[in-house]
Amino acid sequence: MTCYDRRDLGLLLLRLGTGGVLAAHGAQKLFGWFGGHGLEGTGQFMESVGYAPGRASAAAAGLAEMGGGTLLALGLATPAAGAAAAGAMAGAAAVHLPNGFFAQEGGYEHPASLGLTAAGLAVTGPGRLSLDHAAGHVLDRGWMVPAALGVTAAVAAFVVGVRSRRLRQRGEGEQGALSEE
């Protein structure tokens, strides 16, 4: 008989809490559930903060959050799930970065916390109270952790970098239009 310890219970609670929050945020973006704006409204917001094309960016963020969150909660494909969620949160944190750290000021505190927790779960694994454990860890191998996190870090850095360039160009264009007036 397998005895679960407090580490397994703690990982289950972290997975359920973090995964649930991420999945709910993804559902807001994808379907407009829980007071969200769906793909259309979220796409317009994504365009306004420099992620283009907006609708595709909203779909990517929503899928990473909802898919990664759901898989984290289930403890399935934990390295990929945690990495996907962490990547989405890196993009969200970039939007909130100019507002400082604290969420009450619109800062990056919340996405940073979710992203770091998701990355931490990718590294530690899901524990024995998970579908990965039940399936013999076929989607949770040691080599998958650095691969998933490395690919996600590269993609997130590229996407946030493109956004930063776009925002700089947008600012330069506005400066030029003001100087012509």
Image: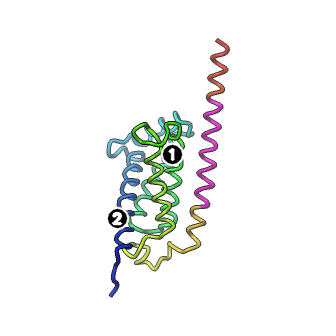
Residue at 65% across / 37% down in the picture? 165
Image quadrant assignment for residue 104: top left
Mark 2 surroundings: few (<14), some (14-19) or many (≥20) residues within 10 A:
few
The N terminus sits in image quarter:
bottom left
Membership of 60 in magenta stretch: no
5 lies above or below 101: below
- For disc 2, the marked residue is 13
Q: Inspect the image, locate mark 1, and give the three-letter code of the amino acid beneath it.
A: Ala
Q: Is residue 151 left or right of residue 38?
A: right
Side of 74 relative to 97 (left or right): left
Q: Residue at x 34, y 71 (%)?
A: 9
Residue 157 inside the magenta-drawn segment = yes
Determine the residue positioned at 60% across, 34% down.
167
Q: Which residue is mark 1?
A: 93
Q: Is 21 rendered above or below residue 76?
A: above
Image quadrant where residue 117 sits: bottom left
Q: Three-letter amino acid code at disc 2?
A: Leu
Residue located at (45% from left, 53% from top): 113
Whole-percent x and y of residue 116? 49, 56
The label on residue 51 is: none
Element marked by disc 1: helix
Task: For marks 1 and 2, give the CA distance.
Answer: 24 Å
In this rendering, the answer to whether 85 lies above or below 167 is: below
The answer to which of marks 1 and 2 sits earlier in the sequence is 2
Could you tell me residue 50's position as x and y percent?
56, 37
Which element is circle 2 on? helix
The residue range painted magenta reads 150-170
